[in-house]
Image (cartoon, grey):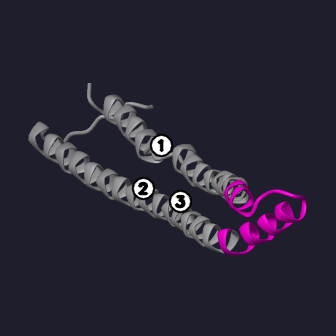
Amino acid sequence: MVNQRDDRPLTELLTGLVSDISGLFRKEIDLAKAEASENLNRAVGSIETLLIGLVFAIGAIGVLLAAVVKGLAAFLVAQGMTEPNADALSAAVVGAVVALLAWAMVSRGLSTLRDGSFKFDRTAASLRRDVDVVKERVP
């Protein structure tokens, strides 16, 4: 940076510097607010995905327990198993499958939440640039 002679009084220079710095920090705060809003929106979207997965898991449990358990139990009875044992085994098998599906959806939602970057990268980079500019201007 080229040093130029400035004939303004020191108080005027300092007042200008303070004004510039305060304006700069106001802009940084605005940027931080915008980034926080973006991060919040991303988190809300991930939570919505997680909740939709949970609703599907509950619906799947109801549908599968009502239909597949009966069908599997009927198949097991036809294979020679007693009806109470066939009902119990088919309920356990279907419950395990539904639990795996529910786990997959919940894991996906949680993974999205964990993988989402909720850092203030742009604000931090901008603040570093601002500090460098201030360092250059202050002797």
Q: Which residue is mark 1?
A: 121
Name the residue: 83% across, 63% down.
Answer: 77
Whether 73 is drawn above or below 15: the answer is below
Callout 2 environment at 10 Å: few (<14), some (14 to 19), or many (20+)?
some
Pick the quarter of the image with the C terminus: top left
Identify the mark at residue 104; answer none if there is no mark.
none
Name the residue: 57% across, 64% down.
Answer: 49
Most common secondary structure along the magenta stretch: helix
Q: Identity of the amino acid at label 2?
A: Glu
Residue 51 falls left or right of residue 85: left
Q: Identity of the amino acid at label 3?
A: Ser
Q: Specify whether residue 101 is painted magenta.
A: no
Image location (x, y in percent) of residue 12: 13, 45
Query: How many numbered marks are there?
Result: 3
Q: Which residues are magenta?
A: 65-89
- For the residues labelled 2 and 1, say whether their Cβ atoms are less than 8 Å apart: yes
Q: Which residue is mark 2?
A: 35
Q: Earlier in the sequence, mark 1 or mark 3?
A: 3
Observer-nearest residue: 52 or 111? 52
Q: Secondary structure at mark 1?
A: helix
